[in-house]
Image (cartoon, rainbow, N blue to C red):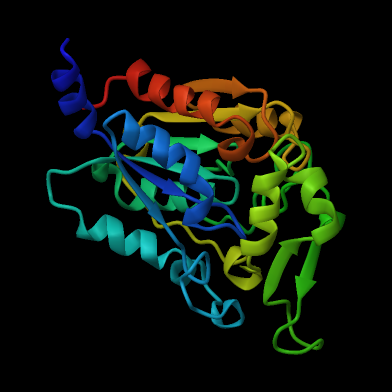
Amino acid sequence: MSKSASSSKHEQLHFVLVHGAGHGAWCWYKIRTLLEGSGYKVTCLDLKCSGIEPTDFNTVFTFAEYNEPLTTFMSSLPTNEKVVLVGHSAGGRSVTSILREFPDKLHMAIYVTAVMVNTGNLTSMDDEDGNNYLELGDADAYELIYGLGPDQPPTGIMVKPELRRIVLYNLSPIEDSTLASMLLRPAPARALRSVRLVEGRGAESVPRVFIKTLKDKLFRPEKQESMIKQWPPSKVFTTESDHCPFFSTPDALFGLLVEAVASIKCD
């Protein structure tokens, strides 16, 4: 296949990259560069109150509102256009929501050490071992923000500043963890506690891929494996990464994304 023919084929695949809690579209900058450099189309979105999206997290109370930028984007796609949807960490909830609501718009769903649970109510999703996937890792790693007062439920949640290098970016370049420390924003705690998935038809027809991060100190591999067991995907890949492979192992993650879409026929 000629280079031009290969590039034309890649342009038919559109990757949509969804960040995890506290992050934004900015976290994908290495992956976007690698994908676009290989001829793929790439969209990186800020969910509500994330990245440079200006909404105050203290005012975002529902998952539907938090996920609205992605839902709007998917709704605006032309009738015959499909995308490869990639979610990281808590962004897996967004992927599953879209998987249920817009299965005809997806070539594939890829979960990068992401929440991958097939249930209509993600506020109640303990597995057989008692793991709860609303909290990735030890609850002590997080700080809660009470933006409406100490007598009200928390409005924000973040990994504690002193633990971010340890549990999020333990293998990432110091430059990236420094950048992240400047750009991270609180995630809307109430929205992430009110996830409701629509009843969807055809979701199981969409290939799902899970990418395990083997050096992850937040979402440990054994918890990832337990989740995979609960809802087995089409393929499972691994990378020797911390929780954020877009920083720590970008070349490996890029290769796995390309391998994923090549390994399963995308109609």
Quarter residue 8 falls in: top left
Asked if residue 99 is positioned above or below residue 189 in the image, the reply reads above
Placement of 32 over or under 213, stated as above or below: below
In the foreground, 75 or 206: 75
Give the residue furthest to the front.
175
User: Could you tell me if residue 184 is visible in this image?
Assistant: no
| Of residues 162 and 126, the one drawn nearer to the viewer in this rendering | 162
Above-or-below relation of 125 to 240: below
Asked if 188 appears above or below 44 in the picture, the reply is below
Quadrant position of residue 240: top right
Number of on-image labels: 0
Q: Residue placed at 63% from the left, 40% from the top?
A: 244
Q: Position of residue 87 (x, y in %)?
A: 49, 44
Image location (x, y in percent) of residue 267: 21, 27
Q: Residue at x 56, y 38 (%)?
A: 246
Q: Among all residues in the image, which is located at the extreme top?
A: 1
Q: Is residue 232 left or right of residue 243?
A: left
Q: Quadrant of residue 220?
A: top right
Closer to us: 14 or 191:
14
| Residue occupying the point 80% across, 66% down | 143
Query: Residue sitting at 72 percent across and 40 percent down?
Result: 219
The spot of residue 111 in percent (x, y) is 51, 37
Figure quadrant of the N terminus: top left
Task: Judge whether residue 98 can be spotted in this image.
Answer: yes
